[in-house]
Amino acid sequence: MNKAFPTDIGSIVERIERVDPIAYARTRNFKEGAVSQLSPYISRGVISPRQILTSLVDRGFSWTTSQKFVQELAWREFYQRLWQSLKDDLFEDILQVRSGVQNRLLPKAMIEGSTGIMAIDEGIRELQETGYMHNHLRMYVASLACNLGHSHWPMPAAWLYYHLLDGDLASNTCSWQWVAGTFNGRKYYCNQGNIDKYFQTPQPDSFLDRSYESLPSGPIPGPLKELVEFQGQTPLPKTKLPVLDPSKPLYLYNAYNLDPNWDRAVDANRILLLEPDHFRRFPVSSKVIQFILALADNIEGIQVYTGEINSIPGIQSIPQVVSKEHPSFQHYPGIKQERDWMFPGLRVNHTSFFRFWKQAERQAKAAFSNKSILAPTV
């Protein structure tokens, strides 16, 4: 079991109840800050941002003290909505073609954790050991790879996604593009002073010990010059063919939908589907697969099946196939239920988070004022 991220539902619910939005707003960028550590469970669909918002309201937190935390949850929902809108175009440069690209590979130092920047190398080792990296460190890593190493963002982003327990294609892809400047038109840089402030690893005379103004024009740092191609492979489990009761509906789960409470009262066939085609395109590590399988243990009566959907025996004779809407799984047949959105009805046809937030904020404020989550609005 991953001690940092337990997989039993009781521990996950306890973690929701421990969220402190006041401490989060004050310390979230620091290494030891009061982050919620809920992202792996949100990404895997075990819990939803709406569930967390409800908990904050029920525990009596005010809108003023919760605003920053809720806004960060809203970023995640915005990225998901953007994926709905852009579809596969999400995986191309969104707003503008990346400038300054010199390679489409990955600095070898990223894989080895040998960039020479202590906080970043420690973060890479933690990532490979636990499947977790602090959000602020993810920005540092992306800045080194894309803006100092001049790598195009897709391969470094795929490398990070491969290791993350909370791997979310929308959040990961958009965050890398934000740092690289293809999402917001401006590249993000970090220097040693910023890292020292938030991670307490002072390194005078490092290649980041420079002013922000000088970073864009400098040469590629020596540790970032050697490049490699990242090709991850997903170690999917070997499974038996699932056995279906043709008189019952079939509920399809996947790596992004592991909600143990999903229509629990319905007597149904339930399958966690691990499609090789999906994982060939978006590979993940063995730690991630084991985490997914452990979370699936919370779902009563679940069968795990490694295979494509059209190879499930007897699926054509099932009276009803049910899944949750998701851009990666539009090929599922049958009914696609809406996800448990924090801000239902808010879709996006633009790339501005703050236009999205302007509408979402009204719903969130009302939730805290009324002490209940608002019904969907269109």
Image (tube, rainbow, N blue to C red):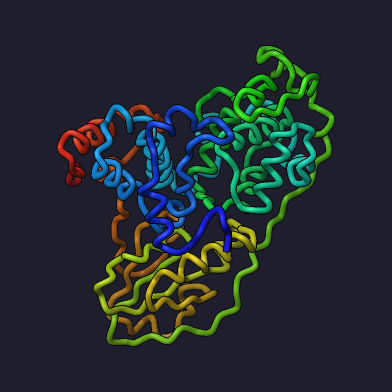
Q: Position of residue 123 (x, y in %)?
A: 67, 41
Height in image: 161 above or below 63? below
Front position in the image: 148 or 28: 28
Image-based side of 225 in relation to 340, left or right: right
**Which residue: 72% across, 24% down?**
202
Front position in the image: 110 or 19: 19
Image-based side of 207 in relation to 185, left or right: right
**Which residue: 30% across, 53% down?**
340
Front position in the image: 261 or 250: 261
Hey, which quadrant is residue 103 in on the image? top right
User: Which quadrant is the C terminus positioned in?
Assistant: top left
Q: How many marks?
A: 0
Q: Position of residue 18 (x, y in %)?
A: 39, 46
Q: Position of residue 177 (x, y in %)?
A: 56, 35
Height in image: 8 above or below 200? below
**Which residue: 55% across, 41% down?**
92
**Which residue: 62% across, 43% down?**
157
Hey, which quadrant is residue 150 in on the image? top right
Question: Which residue of the protein is positioned furthest toward the left in this rendering?
Answer: 370
Height in image: 371 above or below 327? above
Image-based side of 1 in relation to 86, left or right: right
Q: Position of residue 43 (x, y in %)?
A: 46, 52
Hey, which quadrant is residue 357 in on the image? top left
User: Which quadrant is the N terminus positioned in?
Assistant: bottom right
